[in-house]
Amino acid sequence: MGLALEPLHLLAPLSEMPVRIGGVDIGMTLSPFVYYLAEPADLRPNGEVAEAYWVPLAHLWDARTPRTWRSSAAARR
């Protein structure tokens, strides 16, 4: 992705969550972390990441924001 995160950027880990596909636990765990960057970095998707987005925190805090999301890459499958 070309994103260089330093320990000083780390704000906090979030709760781990089981990864499910179609409601079925696939034996993987998502371990999210929150980092702070003063400016958005240039993200370069690669062979492991099809798409990347910057989302304002205000959007995530908004109660009207859907709690699930399907990427356009997943929709093409």
Image (cartoon, grey):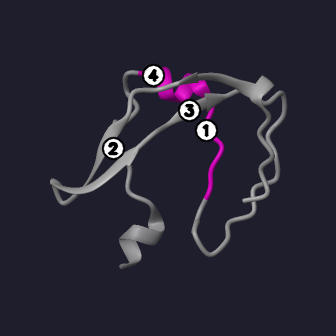
* Amino acid at dot 2: Thr
| Mark identifier at residue 62 | 4
- Circle 1 SS class: loop
Q: Is residue 25 left or right of residue 57?
A: left
Q: What is the number of callouts on the image?
A: 4
User: Is residue 46 located in the magenta-colored stretch of the structure?
Assistant: no
Q: Amino acid at mark 4?
A: Asp
The magenta-colored residue range is: 52-62
Which of pointers 1 and 3 indicates the residue nearer the eye? 3
Whether pointer 2 and pointer 4 mark residues with C-beta atoms closer than 8 Å, the reply is: no
Is 21 located above or below residue 68 in the figure? below
What percent of the width, then of the height, locates residue 35?
67, 29
Determine crowd level at label 3: few under 14, some 14-19, many 20+ residues with C-alpha closer than 10 A. Answer: few
Q: Quadrant of residue 18?
A: top left
Instruction: Indicate which disc, 3 or 2, sits on the residue closer to the N terminus.
Output: 3
- The amino acid marked with disc number 1 is Val
| Residue at numbered disc 3 | 33
Displayed quadrant of residue 55: top right
Circle 2 residue: 68
Mark 4 against mark 3, which lies toward the viewer? 3
N-terminal label among 1 and 3? 3
Residue type indicated by callout 3: Phe
Q: Position of residue 8 (x, y in %)?
A: 79, 24
Taking 33 as reference, is 17 left or right?
left
Q: Secondary structure at mark 2?
A: loop
Look at mark 1 in the image and give the residue it sits on: 55
Q: CA distance from mark 2 to mark 4?
A: 13 Å
Residue shown at 58% from the left, 69% from the top: 48
Find residue 44 and report its horizontal and vertical position in percent.
75, 63
